[in-house]
Every structure is written in structure tokens, then in C-alpha cells.
Amino acid sequence: MKRMVLTQHTVRCPLEDETASITVRTAPDSYPSRRHRDVTACSLLPSTPFRPLARMCYFTDVPDVPVSYLREVSSAPRHSLGVACPKRCLAVLNAAEPGAAEPIRCTSGVSDSLELIRQTQNPAITRLLWFYGM
């Protein structure tokens, strides 16, 4: 499997109903319906820097009374690594890929039900119908 690449796309956000420019982690050799994996940046939700808060810690070697101290953190701002939204634009991108929705084809014309179920349903439903259905 090859490495994932970052690609730029312009889509209409399903949540904000505005045009967004997004950077997506893409697996180029994957199936068209599963090619785009993760949103790394979005123009509607810019990455804002934040400063981590000081933490209250306790000494572990004091046996009876917990003694606390304030743990210092660096004052340099940090950036979040992900986009804080449900990322519904990934479904839009994957559905828009050419070849994402293949036409359903019959194999022989006689007793094709299991093959049609395999092509249209997920593996768990197919397994259930194979064992308990037909």
C-alpha cells in the first residue's frame, strides 16, 4: 500500500452551507468510495493556537497526606492537529469520485440473489443471509 497524499479540494460544506477549501489525506490506490480518508485543514474552521493550562499534580512519595504542586507548562502556543467538525464533506468527496457507484450486475440470471446481496450490502448482512436466510 502506498503512502497517503495530501490533496486540495473546494466543496460546499454540508453543515455551514458555504464553499470551503479543504486539505484531505487521500489514499490514491484505494477504492473510489473510500479514497478520501481524513480532513487535515478547512478554510471554514481555521486552526487557532491555544495555550495549555497548568496542571495540578501530587507527590507520590508522601504516605499520609497528598501534597500537591503546580506543574508548569511552556507558554508557547500550540496548534490543534485535527479539524473539530463531523467531517461530513468526506462522504461528499467520496461519492463524487468517478467509479464510486458501480452499476449492479447479475452473474447468470438464475439464482443471483446471494451475488446481488454481496454487491449491495455490507459483509455482516451478507453473512447473516448466507447462514440463516436462503
Image: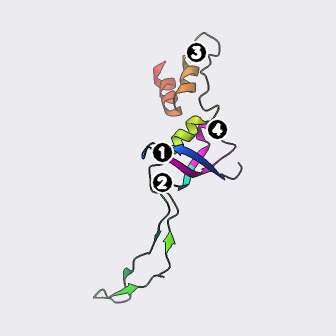
Q: Are marks 1 and 2 in contact (CB under 8 Å)?
A: yes
Q: Most extreme residue toward the left, as rendered?
A: 65
Instruction: Calculate the distance from the C-alpha at mark 3 to the C-alpha at mark 2.
Output: 47 Å
Disc 3 target residue: 112
At mark 2, the secondary structure is loop
At 48% from the left and 48% from the top, the residue drawn is 87
Which of label 4 and label 2 is nearer to you?
2
Q: Mark 3 or mark 1, which is nearer the start of the sequence?
A: 1
Range of residues picked out in magenta: 19-37
Instruction: Calculate the distance from the C-alpha at mark 4 to the C-alpha at mark 2.
Output: 28 Å
At mark 4, the secondary structure is loop
- Find residue 105 and report its image quarter: top right
Disc 4 target residue: 31
- Find residue 98 and report its image quarter: top right
Q: Position of residue 55 (x, y in %)?
A: 38, 79
Q: Is residue 65 above or below residue 90?
A: below
Q: Position of residue 131 (x, y in %)?
A: 49, 25
Q: Is residue 85 above or below residue 48?
A: above
Amino acid type indicated by mark 3: Asp
